[in-house]
Amino acid sequence: MKLTGAPPSPTAHAFVRWTLRHGRTLWIVAILLGIPATARTVNLYLHLRSEVEELLPRQAPSVQALDEMRARSPGLEFLGVVVQVQSAAELPEAERFLDDLAARVRAYPPEMVRDVRSSNAAEKDFVEKHAALYTDVADLKEIRRRIEARRDFEVSKEQGQLLDEDETPPSVDIADIERKYDGKVSNEKGGHLESATLLAAMLTVEAGGFSTGAEKDRVLLSRVKADIAALDPARYVPGMRVGYASDVAINVEEFDALQADLSIASVLVVLAVVAVIVLYYRWWKSVPVLLPPLLLATVYAFALASLPPLNVKELNSNTAFLGSIIVGNGINVGLILLARYREERARGASVDDALIAGVWGARLGTLAAAAAAGVSYASLVLTEFRGFRQFGCIGGIGMLASWGTAFVLVPPLLKWLDTGGPAALRAPRGGAWLLDVVQRFALPIVVVAGTLGVASGVEVSRFDSSFLENDFNKLRRADTWTNGEGYWGRKMDAILGHYLTPTVVLCDTEEEARKVDTLARESAEHGALQPMVARVVGADDVLPIEQGAKVAEAGRIRDALTPKIRSLVDPKKRDQIDRVLGADDLAPIHVGDLPHVFTTGLRERDGSIGRTVLIYPRPTDLLYKADTIHLFVRTLRAIGAEAAGPGARACRVAGSVPITSDILASIQRDAPIASLASFLGVVVVVLVVLRARMASLYVIVSLVLGVLWLLGATMGLGIKINFTNFIAFPITFGIGVDYAVNVMTRYVQDGKKDIRGAVIATGSAVALCSLTTIIGYSSLLLAKNRALFLFGLLAVLGEIACLTAAVVALPAWLVLRRRPSPDATPEGDPRAAA
């Protein structure tokens, strides 16, 4: 279909008459379809999932490892309750409060809470009683050797057999050996989990099952908060602060922020879009003309995505905001259509004739724009990142559904609602000043636009990994570091000396696990894991090996430590030996004898231990940085492969850190693919739909210029690209081309004579389109989640850049291209017609 200044085609006449003749039927069908579509959409939002593994494909190594861990282990998820007082003298009362809270939490059902811990007393008593079993046989033999050497010395001295009467007695100091076993429990005093330096104390609650989502976690946290309120912390210590940390607190905090941001965004987007529509058209009926078809398109998009073969059954943190985004972007079709209709009505056309001219004039530009936007969303389907695949499916369907509902359902609405005369709709005047600026300053505008494009290109050529956001601390809720989990979590980590939740290495045999244990300890002490790992815990740390030999050796030490020798040994050194020997009735222990905290993460559902190894990270910011996250996971996976041996299944690494690593790797792999696919798809759509070679070229150049400006601004302002905001780039290709397509289409339809209609009528409508889209993205600027905020910021910058390129730079270039030379025929002369 060649773009010319010809009148509306017979097809346009027939289509509009068909929509008007069957308008009632079309709306009845649309509403009937909208009922189940709305139900499905609501169901998707009711199943909003915040689990980070929901963003990855099920075959991702970290997701498979997490599934295996859930199947094998009862759970490794914790809630930390941290209290802070104003002086060390208040700590005992704070600890009493935690003990009272612990007593209440222990009464929770086992499916909610597995264990509560506010002190190390029980495990310290157990270790002290069985200390010899937790000491290596070689060290026990060394202790016996030192005692026997002292015994032999005293016997020789008593019998007068010493060669030198001034000879120094052999030392029985075993402090060097005792230091090797420090840290068997996190508080060697065996008291509460507290820090006098931080003026803080804490308790830990082990949740009934592992989850990275918020549904079960919110129930647990809410119940704990209710018990804290019932206890009334002020009754214990006036002014005592209480906070929450670790997995449960993180999941609830981030999910609650997502829900709050989503609710606020949805309301603000609808209100703001309604306001700008009314202000622009100065006709209140424009709202019922535009919004019902758009809302139907939105629920259709979610409903269709929930059906086979896409089968989207729940939304995640990436797709939750799609409703607002589809409304902000999808309304562009209706805005352009209504603008063309309004223009014809202002010229005196009847409703039917204005509809025919509006549909005919808006069809190609809006189709190209909707198809390009759909393609840009659909490019995300090529990624392996499940969160973006769903985003692409729903967004792509939403753009095409918005185009279809606008052209099918808006004409009948206008016929029913526009009952006034042509004067009721005034001609647009918003773009007159812009037309004047473009025509008067065309050359400077083109020069400045080109210069900025070149400068942006130079800036983009400097792009490297330093422009990627590697610090995940900067992507959490902005207030988490002042009064949220970030603040309290750091206090908890400092009290414990390590993160509460470990990374788990899952092995198939006990032999593999022992190899992993050995290799991980070596790396933690002298290798790549040294700055990141606080301690490694395996089955042999909690259920000692060679227990029989150790019991026998402890007996020999007691035999060597006769009353005479005991009386001669310094009391402090005697106490050291007694601590190592433990109870007099020392006997081998079994899995069932161990305190629960010893086997958390190690004991499997069948009751066995020995096939898992726990890696406890240090309380450091290193594991919020991409490079060290990858190094940590890569090192553990390499250790798992080495322990399993050639040809065997490598040991798996499970936990939140491996999931984060896989998310980062997926984005780094998928981002270039999605961006390139989006750009090529948009180019193909523009070439196919417009079919005007030079017009298509101008549109594509305008888009590239806008994206270059966006990249230049991003790098110039120091905005780093992260796992959420990178999708602003492929999406900008599709949405940004919308404006250039419609401006260029109008220019060609007007016979390429001048840019008046393209700037004043279409340009102002395009600006309105961009404003509604900016409103949709700006809702994310209110998000407490910094990752979503930065996505909204980049998307808004992309809108501004592409809009400026389309309605300022492109028309200025067209003015220069059509500007006659001094001896040419004036443009207004009929002989100058194209």
Image (cartoon, rainbow, N blue to C red):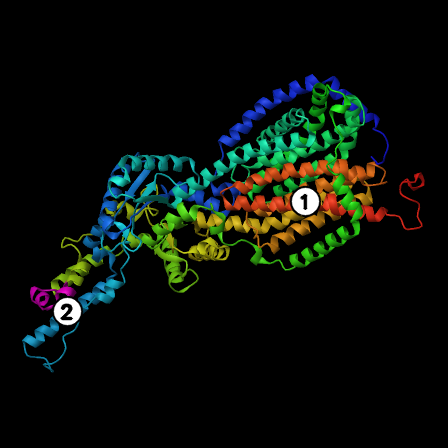
The answer to which image quadrant residue 244 occupies is top left
Report whether 560 appears left or right of 82.
left
The residue beneath circle 1 is 733
Depth check: give the residue in front, 291 or 164: 291
Q: Residues within 10 Å of mark 1 (few under 14, many from 20)?
A: many
For disc 2, the neighbor class at 10 Å (few under 14, some 14 to 19, many from 20) is many
Above or below, 754 against 617 in this view is: above
Q: How many marks?
A: 2
Residue 86 in the image: state x and y as whole percent: 29, 50
- What quarter of the picture does the C terminus occupy? top right
* Residue 569 drawn in magenta: yes
* Residue at 40%, 61% in the rendered image: 530
Residue 766, percent across and down? Answer: 71, 38
In terms of secondary structure, where does tag 2 sit?
helix
Q: Determine the secondary structure under disc 1.
A: helix
Percent from the top left, x then y, of residue 672? 63, 50
Report the magenta stretch's main SS: helix
At a point 78% along the width and 49% down the height, the residue shown is 441
Q: Is residue 105 visible from the viewing direction of this image?
A: yes
Left or right? Give the position of 628 relative to 111: right
Height in image: 349 above or below 711?
Answer: above
The residue range painted magenta reads: 561-574
Instruction: State which tag comes first along the sequence, 2 or 1.
Output: 2
User: Where residue 148 is drawn, which disc sits there?
Assistant: 2
State yes or no: residue 528 in magenta: no
Along the viewing direction, whichever of 794 and 589 lies nearer the viewer: 794
- Which amino acid, by three-letter code, is at mark 1? Phe
Q: Position of residue 580 (x, y in %)?
A: 19, 60
The amino acid beneath tag 2 is Glu
Q: For the residues marked 2 and 1, what is the alpha-carbon distance in whole angstroms? A: 82 Å
Image height of 822 relative to 531, above or below? above
Residue 556 appears in the figure: no
